[in-house]
Image (cartoon, rainbow, N blue to C red):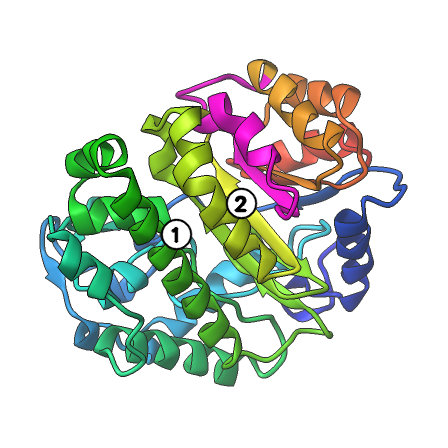
């Protein structure tokens, strides 16, 4: 049955989100289905003229040209009966360019996304980088947010976008190869730069939320369609996939702890490539929630179960995003606690949704 609420955003869904954050007793996990893939460019007509390896400038991004396509993506909620609230953010899905651009990186087009180019700055210049609220890229970001708020008119939540974390920004400012050598050869300066970038990261999200309305009294992350009862931030440290646990604990863990303390409903985005460091992330008591991708090119779902259980055994809410076969869905339901569990499933068809629903207790 199609939802009678615009975009499927029935306010009653908020109760399941509250139960997720509280890890309350529930009959089944929080479940959402989305046909929206990992990367954004294919969904927006405004960027179809961009060519691979082109550089984009803020004046090329005109929010009004994107708004109709935003709502086309969100309309899936009217046809899919699930627990998911659907909202939007400046450049939907994963478009992690705004902080890098504000810090001076050139933004280059990839086949499916964009990337900030590394700058290879000396230490002094890297440490001088700040969140400049008058920077054209920050102004463009806030223009997008304002345009979305005006368009939504309360029908769907608006959130921050997905952004690179401190270790990723360190790699862009100093260089990807150089940053690894930095950690070993210049740990003092590396720690100083990482903490500085952590504060830039916090400032960016705090400034964003000064400009956004709450949605039914709560905050939101549009990449994962995650409503939260308190201030939210999406953390990530993708670059740590090539760190040692020792270096993470020494130089990055204090930064992530500092960030997490600023937002009651923080969560960290992790890939399966970072599971060898999951223990070190879990040591941060302030990290409230863990989002872990299912990635078919890496560890299969069966192999990920022990890591999912580690998060649950630590008493943290767990958001799993990716595709699930019927057998994998059964494994998840048989092996994991439904309390504090959110399955953000990326099916390929409506038929796949219909097969998964009864397995998931829907």
Q: Residue at x 61, y 46 (%)?
A: 287
Q: Where in the figure is residue 239, as x and y percent of width and height?
A: 33, 37
Q: Where in the figure is residue 339, as x and y percent of width and height?
A: 81, 38
Q: Is residue 121 left or right of residue 250?
A: left
Is there a contact, CB below 8 Å, between mark 1 and mark 2?
A: no
Q: Residue at x 57, y 56 (%)?
A: 76
Residue farthest toward the top in the current orientation of the protein: 303
Number of numbered discs visible in the structure rendering: 2
Q: Which residues are magenta?
A: 274-301
> Label 1, on which residue?
94
Q: Is residue 360 left or right of residue 41?
A: right
Assign a secondary structure to mark 1: loop
Name the foreground residue: 253 vs 111: 253
Q: Is residue 342 above or below residue 244?
A: below
Q: Is 340 a magenta residue?
A: no
Q: Is residue 270 above or below residue 207?
A: above
> Label 2, on which residue?
268
Q: Residue at x 18, y 77 (%)?
A: 59
The quadrant in which residue 344 appears is top right
Q: Is residue 62 visible?
A: yes
Q: Where in the figure is residue 137, as x and y percent of width and height?
A: 25, 73
Q: Is residue 332 above or below residue 136?
A: above
| Mark 1 nearby-residue class (10 Å; few <14, some 14–19, many ≥20) | many
């Amino acid at each position: 049955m199609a939802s009678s609420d615009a975009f499927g955003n029935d306010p009653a869904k908020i109760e399941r989100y509250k139960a997720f954050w509280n890890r309350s007793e529930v009959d089944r996990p929080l479940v959402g289905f989305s046909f929206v893939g990992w990367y954004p460019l294919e969904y927006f007509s405004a960027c179809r003229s961009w060519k691979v390896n082109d550089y984009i400038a803020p004046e090329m991004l005109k929010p009004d040209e994107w708004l109709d396509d935003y709502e086309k993506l969100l309309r899936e909620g009217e046809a899919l009966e699930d627990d998911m609230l659907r909202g939007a953010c400046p450049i939907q899905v994963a478009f992690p360019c705004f902080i890098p651009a504000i810090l001076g990186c050139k933004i280059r087009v990839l086949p499916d996304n964009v990337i900030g180019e590394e700058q290879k700055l000396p230490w002094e210049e890297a440490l001088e980088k700040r969140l400049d609220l008058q920077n054209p890229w920050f102004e463009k970001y806030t223009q997008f947010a304002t345009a979305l708020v005006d368009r939504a008119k309360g029908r769907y939540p608006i959130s921050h976008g997905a952004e690179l974390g401190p270790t990723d920004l360190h790699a862009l400012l100093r260089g990807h190869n150089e940053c690894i050598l930095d950690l070993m050869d210049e740990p003092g300066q590396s720690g100083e730069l990482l903490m500085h970038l952590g504060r830039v990261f916090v400032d960016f999200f705090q400034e964003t939320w000064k400009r956004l309305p709450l949605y039914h009294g709560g905050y939101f992350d549009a990449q994962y369609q995650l409503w939260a009862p308190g201030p939210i931030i999406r953390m990530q440290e993708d670059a740590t996939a090539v760190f040692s646990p020792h270096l993470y604990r020494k130089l990055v863990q204090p930064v992530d702890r500092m960030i997490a303390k600023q937002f009651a409903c923080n969560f960290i985005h992790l890939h399966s490539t970072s599971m060898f460091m999951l223990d070190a992330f879990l040591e941060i008591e302030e990290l409230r929630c863990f989002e872990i991708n299912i990635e078919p090119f890496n560890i299969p779902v069966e192999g990920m179960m022990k890591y999912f259980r580690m998060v649950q055994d630590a008493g943290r809410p767990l958001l799993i995003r990716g595709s699930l076969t019927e057998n994998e869905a059964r494994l998840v339901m048989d092996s994991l606690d439904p309390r504090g569990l959110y399955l953000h499933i990326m099916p390929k068809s409506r038929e796949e949704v219909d097969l998964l629903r009864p397995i998931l207790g829907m």
